[in-house]
Image (cartoon, helix red, strand yellow):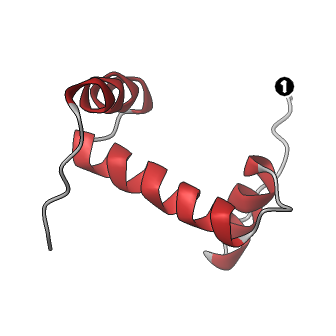
């Protein structure tokens, strides 16, 4: 495990996003890095496509929720 240096402005944005997404600051930064890496490797995929593929890879069953 290593240390990644980021500027104060970016750190503040990670901190704010982490509170909204209920993640630690490190988990939020790691999430953004992973999504960014996947987006660069798959430029034709949207964020939704990337997330759908990751959920499928993890064998998460996604289904629509109804009001019933």
Q: Where residue 31 sits: x, y (%)? A: 44, 53
Residue 38 in which image quadrant: bottom right
Q: Is residue 42 above or below residue 48?
A: below
Q: Is residue 19 above or below residue 52?
A: above
Where, quadrant-wise, is the N terminus in this rendering?
Answer: bottom left
- As helix, strand or loop, the secondary structure at mark 1 comes to loop
Q: Where residue 3 sits: x, y (%)? A: 13, 61
Identify residue for label 1: 67
Q: Image check: 48 left or right of 34?
A: right
Outermost residue toward the front?
7
Who is closer to the viewer here, 68 or 35?
Answer: 35
Residue visible at 65% across and 64% down?
40
Residue visible at 82% across and 52% down?
63
Q: Where residue 9 sits: x, y (%)? A: 28, 24
Residue visible at 25% across and 32% down?
11
Q: How crowded is mark 1: few (under 14 residues within 10 Å), some or many (20 or more)?
A: few
Is residue 27 among the parts visible in the rendering?
Answer: yes
Residue visible at 20% across and 27% down?
8
Q: Image check: 28 left or right of 44?
A: left
Where, quadrant-wise, is the C terminus in this rendering?
Answer: top right
Is residue 60 among the parts visible in the rendering?
Answer: no
Q: Where residue 15 sits: x, y (%)? A: 27, 28
Who is closer to the viewer here, 63 or 58?
Answer: 58
Residue 28 in which image quadrant: top left
């Amino acid at each position: 495990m290593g240390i990644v240096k980021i500027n104060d402005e970016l750190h503040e944005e990670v901190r704010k996003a982490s509170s909204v997404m209920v993640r630690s600051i490190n988990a939020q930064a790691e999430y953004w890095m992973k999504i960014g890496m996947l987006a660069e490797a798959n430029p034709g995929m949207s964020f939704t496509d990337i997330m759908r593929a990751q959920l499928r890879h993890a064998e998460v069953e996604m289904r629509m929720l109804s009001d019933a």
